[in-house]
Image (cartoon, rainbow, N blue to C red):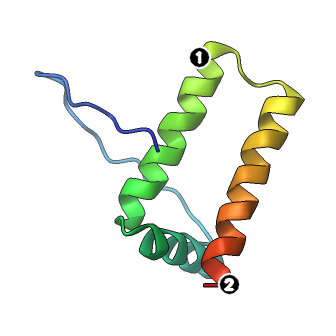
């Protein structure tokens, strides 16, 4: 997981999104399985996507690889 280091003087802001109840439940299950807060998990996902976009790593192969990893993680959590 990507962890954001807080730089002195940086101010954090809240950004709200709408998700279906089943999506929130899935996020909470994954977070619980990883032993992290759901908000931290989602924040890490967003930071990973931003890092990939900045690096230009948005090829189909890169996106498929990330999705494959996410599906494997979901299967691990659901089957646990």
Q: Secondary structure at mark 1?
A: helix
Q: Is residue 75 above or below residue 43?
A: below
Q: Position of residue 74 (x, y in %)?
A: 67, 69
| Location of mark 2 (residue) | 79
Instruction: Mark 2: give few (<14), some (14-19) or many (20+) Cα within 10 Å.
Output: few
Q: Nearer the viewer, residue 56 or 16?
A: 56
Q: Is residue 52 left or right of residue 32?
A: right
Q: Residue at x 44, y 38 (%)?
A: 2
Q: CA distance from mark 2 to mark 1?
A: 34 Å
Q: Residue at x 62, y 26 (%)?
A: 52
Instruction: Count neighbours of disc 1 (C-alpha within 10 A) and say few if under 14, some if 14 to 19, many if 20 or more.
Output: few
User: Looking at the picture, how far across and down is residue 67, in whole percent?
Assistant: 76, 49
Which of discs 2 and 1 lies nearer the camera? The answer is: 2
State whether residue 31 is above or below residue 44: below
Q: Is residue 47 left or right of residue 58?
A: left
Q: Quadrant of residue 12?
A: top left
Please tell me in which quadrant of the rendered image residue 13 appears. Answer: top left
Mark 2 or mark 1, earlier in chain? 1
Residue found farthest to the right:
60
- Residue 5: x, y in percent? 26, 31
Q: Mark 2: which secondary structure?
A: loop
Q: Residue furthest top?
A: 55
Quarter containing the C terminus: bottom right
Residue that carries the numbered disc 1 in the rendered image: 54
Q: State the residue at coordinates (83%, 24%).
A: 59
Q: Residue at x 72, y 73 (%)?
A: 75
Residue 77 rendering spot, x and y as whole percentages: 60, 76
Answer above or below: position of 36 versus 44.
below
User: Is residue 32 rendered to the left or right of residue 30?
Assistant: left
């Amino acid at each position: 997981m990507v962890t954001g280091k807080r730089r002195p003087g940086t101010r954090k802001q809240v950004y709200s999104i709408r998700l279906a109840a089943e999506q929130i439940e899935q996020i909470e299950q994954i977070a619980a399985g990883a032993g992290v807060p759901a908000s931290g998990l989602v924040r890490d996902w967003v930071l990973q996507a931003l890092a990939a976009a900045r690096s230009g790593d948005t090829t189909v192969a890169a996106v498929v690889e990330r999705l494959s990893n996410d599906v494997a993680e979901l299967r691990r959590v659901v089957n646990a």
